[in-house]
Image (cartoon, grey):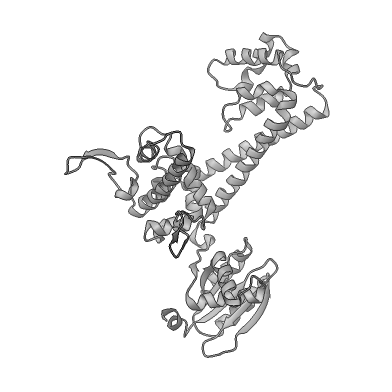
Amino acid sequence: MTATYATLSTVLVAIDISKHRHEVLISIPGKKRRRRLTITNTLEDFQRLATTLASYELPVRIGFEATGNYHRALAHHLGLAGFDLKLVSSVGLARTREALHNSWDKNDPKDAQVILHMLEIGAVQFFHDPLVTGKADIQELSKTHEIVSRSKTELWHRILTHYLPLYFPEAERFHRSSRTDWFLAFLEKYPTPHIIKAMDREAFVADAWHVVGRKVSKERMLSDIYDTAVESVGLPVHPDSDAVRMFRLVLAEGRSLIRQRDEIEARAVELLSDLPDYQLLTTIPGIGPINAMTILAEAGDLRRFRHHRQFLKFCGMDLATTQSGMFRGQSRISKYGNARLRRTLWMAGQTAVLKRTNSFRDKFERYISKDRHNAHLRRKAYTAIAAKMARTVHAVVKNGAPYRPFFEGVSPGGRTSLCSSRGGSSLTS
């Protein structure tokens, strides 16, 4: 009833977004017949639609479903024109379409009708334009960092499963961290053990001294590499063969990806270091510059979530239970939310439990105390830690106070309690 009265004097506009053209359905107060428009993805049509909507001289509320990135340009132009923009959930749209039409069949005009119905009943969400809210640069840095990191991981797996088994299988044990460049630089210079065996030990140590970089006991490690190369079972390919050229080409690509990743991370720190929310987030165990950047890019202003349960639902970490009659299924996280944000919180939680002293590690240890080697129990514990991380992130930013590790205190009943000095019980529960 409230939603109906709220739309009596408002023009409702439903837009079904696609790559090249958009179907528009307009509901004008006092008119039963709805107006249909088809606009293309051009500036001229964007301006034509804005002029048409402004001609009604009434408040305009526009609803649309996020479709890739095709909605961003149209939404930005309509937002600049002063119209109220609302986002329609893809899952909600699909379920409502099935309920209204009793069919899974879909097409653009039908989707516009369903979007208009969801506008009328108020089943919509807020739309925040990243360009207007100042989050566009942060989002692009975050997404590009993920693309580069995934490409680096895929390339490294290719090296592990194809190139090293062929040419230098024993070299894998000398690799320690994917964040270092020295191992790829070493392989680029010495792609096969036969290149190393062509020199004596002293000549190899002197030649490779600056390639390995700053390492403790560098001479001993280089001697170990030389002994390993002498006994290697790698294929005896010629150093000037096309096979070795291709190996070096892949290694050069890997080094380039590492440089790109480091450049993005340095730029992220430079861009965000003065932001208060970034400074607050990085006080939480497990959240470094990249995790903080991803949270800010995907969640935006965390203060818009009045309660941490709203933020949990936004992340898809709210509990959902299947229930029918006397049957009640097991409660699980819904996973209907932002997947990148959920993955970031999961990874931050795993990092936090490895640190020495914090409330996350304490909760994890208490969770698995019954059976430390139970894989299912440990998985549930990590899920609980990820949810706790989400609550902590929300509390720290909303309260404007940095995270502080719990301290032990004695409760009035004489029992030792674990509590947090800032942020309330939600930070340690």
Seen from the viewer's position, the closer of residues 112 and 48 is 112
Classify 160 as above or below 322.
above
Residue depicted at 53% across the width and 60% down the height: 130
Residue depicted at 62% across the width and 73% down the height: 111
Residue depicted at 56% across the width and 69% down the height: 95
Classify 189 as above or below 386.
above
Residue 418, position in %: x, y?
28, 41
The residue lying furthest to the front in this view is: 326
Classify 201 as above or below 167.
above
Classify 197 as above or below 147.
above
Q: How many marks?
A: 0
Residue 377, position in %: x, y?
44, 41
Seen from the viewer's position, the closer of residues 58 and 91 is 91
Residue 78, position in %: x, y?
56, 72
Residue 91, position in %: x, y?
56, 64
Q: Can I make out residue 270 in this image?
A: no
Q: Quadrant of the N terminus?
A: bottom left
Quadrant in the rendering for residue 51: bottom right
Q: Can I make out residue 127 in this image?
A: yes
Residue depicted at 33% across the width and 53% down the height: 399
